[in-house]
Image: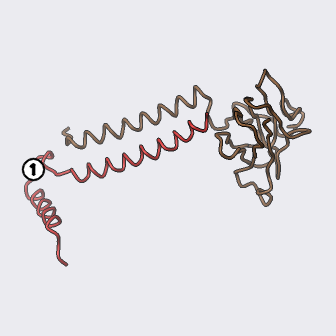
Chain colours: A red, B brown
């Protein structure tokens, strides 16, 4: 199985973090996690608002 | 404790979102009375049809274009008194309902008039009928083998 460059990079990063106990938390790359959280948050807001607006419209 | 910059953003975002949703729900509940049936308005089922307001089922006119509709939901129908409900266009109707047997539903499809009808508890919902027509009232809570025939109407003209 061939790994993508991105996966290899991530693995290297994990190894590096395990080796270096002094690595600062700030250095961890959380951009992907951040994007996932924001996408999920956006989905929740849109669906919640859609139902709430439907309720308001029907309230006349 | 050190928190990553991006973690801070999504924590604030998540907690803020929860706060806003709960605030809107709180306002709806306490200011507009959009709450689930509660034991605050209980009725004794043993002699339900002798207990006000269920001793006189049907429509009561409160004001000009404001009515109170007293009904019960039973297996398998709605007891609306001597006749089906009829109100003029633009009327606001306060429905008050309970059940003498099992849990039922009260729904006017396509509107926000939707509540559970629970034995021993008086539930209420208010709706203003701005459009003329015959509105279906049905049970949306599976109550037994005759559930699908359980319906009545309210005529607005």
- Using the rendered view, name the quadrant where residue B118 is placed: top right
Total number of numbered discs in the rendering: 1
- Using the rendered view, name the quadrant where residue B13 is placed: top left
Identify the residue at image location x=26%, y=48%: A34
Q: Which type of secondary structure does the marked residue at label 1 adopt?
A: loop
The quadrant in which the C terminus of chain B is found is: top right
Q: Which is more toward the observer, B155 or B93? A: B155
Q: Is residue B3 shown to the viewer in this render?
A: yes
Q: Position of residue B120 (x, y in %)?
A: 77, 39
Q: Is residue B126 shown to the viewer in this render?
A: no
Q: Position of residue B1 (x, y in %)?
A: 20, 38
Identify the residue at image location x=68%, y=41%: B115
Residue assigned mark 1: A23
Q: Is residue B102 above or below residue B28?
A: below
Q: Which is more toward the observer, B68 or A57? A: A57
Identify the residue at image location x=26%, y=39%: B9
Q: Which is more toward the observer, B99 or A23? A: B99
């Amino acid at each position: 199985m061939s790994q993508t460059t991105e996966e290899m990079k991530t693995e290297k990063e994990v190894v590096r973090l395990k080796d270096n106990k002094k690595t600062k938390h700030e250095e961890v790359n959380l951009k992907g996690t951040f994007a996932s959280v924001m996408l999920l948050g956006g989905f929740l807001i849109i669906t919640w608002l859609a139902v709430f607006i439907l309720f308001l419209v029907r309230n006349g | 404790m050190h928190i990553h910059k991006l973690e801070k953003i999504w924590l604030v975002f998540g907690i803020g979102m929860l706060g806003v949703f709960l605030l809107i729900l709180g306002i709806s509940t306490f200011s507009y009375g959009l709450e689930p049936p509660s034991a605050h308005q209980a009725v004794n089922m043993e002699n339900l049809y002798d207990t006000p307001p269920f001793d006189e089922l049907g429509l009561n006119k409160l004001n000009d274009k404001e009515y109170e509709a007293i009904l019960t939901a039973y297996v398998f129908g709605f007891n609306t008194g001597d006749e089906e409900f009829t109100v003029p266009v633009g009327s606001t109707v306060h429905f008050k309902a309970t059940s003498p047997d099992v849990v039922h539903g009260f729904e006017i499809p396509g509107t926000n008039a939707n509540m559970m009808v629970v034995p021993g508890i008086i539930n209420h919902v208010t709706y203003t009928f701005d459009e003329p027509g015959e509105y279906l009232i049905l049970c949306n809570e599976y109550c037994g083998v005759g559930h699908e025939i359980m319906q009545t109407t309210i005529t607005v003209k």
